Amino acid sequence: MASPTVMKTDIDLKLAGELAQQLRVDSVRSSTSAGSGHPTSSMSAADLLAVLVGRHLRYDWDDPANRANDHLIFSKGHASPLLYSVYKAVGVVSDDELMSGYRRLGSRLEGHPTPVLPWVDVATGSLGQGLPDAVGVALAGKYLDEAPFRVWVLCGDSEMAEGSIWEALDKASHYKLSNLIAMVDINRLGQRGPTELSWDVETYRRRASAFGARVLTVDGHNVAEIDRAMSEAADITGDQPTVILARTIKGRGFSEVEDREGWHGKPFPPEMAERAIIELGGERALVVRGPRPDKTASGGHAPDAGPAVTLPVYAVGDKVATRKAYGQALAALGARTDIVAMDGEVSNSTFADEFAQKYPERYFEMYIAEQQLVAAAVGFSVRGYRPFASTFAAFFTRAYDFIRMAAISQANIRLVGSHAGVEIGADGPSQMALEDLAMMRAVQGSTVLYPSDATSAAALVQAMADRDGVVYMRTTRGAYPVLYAAGDAFPVGGAKVLRATDDDQVTLIGAGVTLHTCLDAADQLKADGISARVIDVYSVKPIDTGTLTAAAAATGGKLVIAEDHHPEGGLGSAVVDALTGAGRADLTVRHLAVAELPGSGTSAELLDAAGISAGHITAAARDMAR
Amino acid sequence: MASPTVMKTDIDLKLAGELAQQLRVDSVRSSTSAGSGHPTSSMSAADLLAVLVGRHLRYDWDDPANRANDHLIFSKGHASPLLYSVYKAVGVVSDDELMSGYRRLGSRLEGHPTPVLPWVDVATGSLGQGLPDAVGVALAGKYLDEAPFRVWVLCGDSEMAEGSIWEALDKASHYKLSNLIAMVDINRLGQRGPTELSWDVETYRRRASAFGARVLTVDGHNVAEIDRAMSEAADITGDQPTVILARTIKGRGFSEVEDREGWHGKPFPPEMAERAIIELGGERALVVRGPRPDKTASGGHAPDAGPAVTLPVYAVGDKVATRKAYGQALAALGARTDIVAMDGEVSNSTFADEFAQKYPERYFEMYIAEQQLVAAAVGFSVRGYRPFASTFAAFFTRAYDFIRMAAISQANIRLVGSHAGVEIGADGPSQMALEDLAMMRAVQGSTVLYPSDATSAAALVQAMADRDGVVYMRTTRGAYPVLYAAGDAFPVGGAKVLRATDDDQVTLIGAGVTLHTCLDAADQLKADGISARVIDVYSVKPIDTGTLTAAAAATGGKLVIAEDHHPEGGLGSAVVDALTGAGRADLTVRHLAVAELPGSGTSAELLDAAGISAGHITAAARDMAR
């Protein structure tokens, strides 16, 4: 039987205990009703959440957009029944929605939390990501917003095996993020059995402490202990992040499953759920509210997209690397206070240092920790900033899970990868991005840009700033001639036709360095009496289907596509997918790409060895034009 | 002037100091000669390597294939001048090769080490990978080979910021890898400035110790201290990995650059190099050999591909999940002692537990640490085993940099990802692999398999065991009807035609779950009087171009391709790339894929919502056949 609805604020510890039981009951009910979900992983953390939400989390549930609110991130996203039961307990989700919506088609109460819910900052469910994302939120709070909100993160113990957790704690202590509090639910059991460290809280303590955290250890089912630890953690005047290690029992409160293997990610069958609810003291209908931000508390500085920006200007014919143009354009964009930049310890190669020198207060060095690099960008996006994160293009592969999840988080982040392809030369294949275009194109809702000259690169950097979703730009190591005059327009989704006549026999398609080899090839072909159209596909996704279909139509479907990338999923795929997607396609395609494993050499040698130099393009086009 | 060539074995400490100077000189000479490279990062670690190679590394340089040899892995791969100078010092690379080959086209002395050299186990250069790879080698040594070799790893201090380093130390201590010795060259300077921890050796010590290592601290330029530490580390009777923390000076030995910023990754100009060589005492031509494996020392057990394996048999029409068939086939393959399996704490979902239960001695639980999961597989491959690593397909995105590097390492690894696509249902998008096919196809030399039924899954698991390179299989969560009879052949690179008549009007192409929706669609179309050819593209890379071109020719170029994957880089791209790559292609393609962000729901609901259900395929084909 449900007790009558009450609205309590700043509840006492006894009521917190009651609330915890309600959260357990509702976790059981919702998951059983859905026929899937993780009740036992929710039950272990219910006391932590009851005390937090009832007594410490400063949150105006009626105004999730209030910038003074604390943040609450479930890094263990599979405990979604607990999170959604919290939402019910604070009165923002109805019992009916919880019971009929959870994990159902079209519901916002998805299997793992996503920001389709207004109280969710980031999608979680790939473990080891919520805490790194939170580092970004806390960085924004401490250094940009300069606001007193706290970032509370619920971590699972299994995810402490992810390296990304340690990248996060390392950066949290490096940046003295006293506004970050990680609560680790040490319930000893993972999906298939015991965790690596089981209840060895002392080892967790030594590790977190060595990584610079203030560590507090509690019995995770003792609300008084939890309360004391949270009171201590809530004081953010220090210079360390806090880690609360909570020893808990999986399935706590229901003796049939407590601390038992075999119950991860399994809802209880209805009869069993009934027994659980009885043992937990029955259904309750508490509605509780914890503290709100002080009326005087400010959300701090807000990001601002003004003032207007003046981009750097390049003279046609000058040799300028697109990575250099990236740095210079980013430094120009820095006039906007919503622009934030970070880099993975290679800012003198990516040229993010141009921004760092001009706006050190909005530049964050992430050192060699690419997962945290991307996660920090996601966190800045949560606070409304427009982050640019850069490293060698090859090393974004390190963060692909974070990039994929950023799309599900509906984060607005900009990633800029330099040193792409065999063009980099002597450093060899470990440093050559040859799969980045494929990787980035496959991200839901992504934008993929690949400029060939400094003018277009600078214009696209500006376009990136205001484009939502995951926006990627690939830049090139070497300096190549500026092709476009200042002021030329480069809309995302466009392409440029650089050579065209009414008698074109073949179309040459390139981007980045291969646009230059295509132009050289067109010159060679012209000397042979063959007229070639040349297209700069600076926007790989979305792609300019109109320009491509027109060119294909004009040149009898004969295309040579050259790219400094493996053959799969990059520029060639983008072009062919666009043409075949546009209707009946009658094509003869020669796709030149890096098929074999490259070694070291000069740029010119490696472009030629890979078959994407002007000579190879010329030969392919000549064959075709015959 | 070069001194006369001498061949010394088991050198004393004084000669080790001389050798260190030679390694520095040769690092300077080779990088200056190449015009690129990292001399200062080599000079800091020269004393470590001189003592190691001269006195501790047990290695028969004339027989790198000797399984009793120690392993030497440069996790800081950019110190390649040092590594190659070591090869010169032990007499396996000539001074001429070092000076004229380093970083040149076609040379095996690439910018970062790769296994084109017989003494290199794994490609490095993406930081934070050598140590995790070494964990795999050490696991093989301790648990499978049961051989006394040691695995020595040179780490940089910058890469200690990578989470993967901590995944590696965590697993090394969990598995008591006393045969693993990490030497950290703490030279304080990264690429663009000081490292995060600078010379804070105490913090490194606390971290490594908390992660379970025996930690030894040395002055990295004091050969006697180094020697004592290595003597201690070389005793592998304990149950902990060893970390030697060496405080060093970047550019050590050349006063113009010692401990100076701005000299990372820069060769010295020729005149400067001359001054460096003079200050370092001039060129030397020492040839030294350290200890070799004891004559009595064994390389331990060797992996063996026998005996013949009997695969599980499935009855046509029975409903069996391909992930289940994976587990059962893997358990059958376990009769071969070269087969090793590991999983990221989800073995009861991937069904790797079928193998784990039968062959616990060859199963390694990697917990939730996907980077280390893949790195361990690479390490097992180094020792000649045939590893299978499994987790949810979505979570291989976490390890993409490791997968990319595995290809450069020429490692032979098998990755099996379960729970792909929206088909998984209620868990939501964080758990849905929707970019894995694109990601895996773009890996150099990779194989990508995606079976639709249990019979083909089992056959392909067997084929994977003997296939080299990075071999990926995507499995499906749900149970679908067995389509093929036991004994049917499923060669890698093949496809199956499941429906075909002489009057086919359209071709339906699917794999995995969408093959079943294509078959349902074909039945619906038949009822409408439309004859559809249906193709099972179980081998996505390599792909069966012949079968596809024949089908396209037979059906007027009309194709419907359905895949449970984002539209970019997956099955659709593979098919279209194959057809356009095969010559003139006249195609009308309807490509059905998961374009929007999915939520939760049932499999059937989500397949339909994504537009890849039988109904959508039928509608697309009907339009086309008109």
Image (spheres, coloured by chain):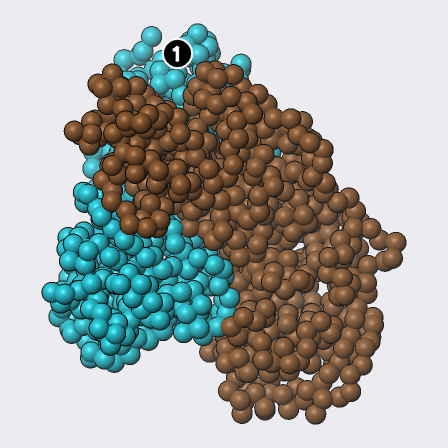
Chain colours: A cyan, B brown
Q: Which residue is mark 1?
A: A282
Q: Nearer the viewer, residue B61 or B204?
A: B61
Vertical side of A409 occupied by B528: above or below: above
- Looking at the image, which is closer to me, A190 or A328? A328
How far across and how far down the image is residue A484, in percent?
Answer: 18, 72
Task: Locate residue B327: give its quadrant.
Answer: top right
Residue B615: x and y, percent?
A: 25, 23
Drawn side of residue A174 relative to residue A357, left or right: right
Q: Is residue B77 left or right of residue A42?
A: right
Q: Quadrant of the C terminus of chain A?
A: bottom left
Quarter occupied by the N terminus of chain A: top left
Relative to A354, is B626 above or below?
A: above
Would you place residue A228 above or below residue B223 in this image?
Answer: above
B100 up-or-down from B169: above or below: below
Q: Amino acid at mark 1?
A: Gly
For disc 1, the neighbor class at 10 Å (few under 14, some 14 to 19, many from 20) is some
In this rendering, position of residue B93 left or right of residue A568: right
Q: How many marks?
A: 1
> What's the residue at 73%, 52% (across, down)?
B179
Q: Nearer the viewer, residue B349 or B17?
A: B349
What's the residue at 13%, 70% (across, down)? A487
Query: Which residue is located at x 26 percent, y 39 percent?
Result: B557
Where residue B41 appears, as percent x and y from the top left, is 57, 73
Tell me the element at label 1.
Answer: loop
The residue under the point 34% across, 57% down is A591
Residue A228 position within the rendered picture, expressed as x and y whole percent measured from the top left: 46, 37
B130 vs B599, left or right, is right
| Closest to the observer, A58 or A130 | A130
Residue B237 seen in the figure: yes
Chain ID, mark 1: A
Can residue A125 be seen from the camera position used here?
Answer: no
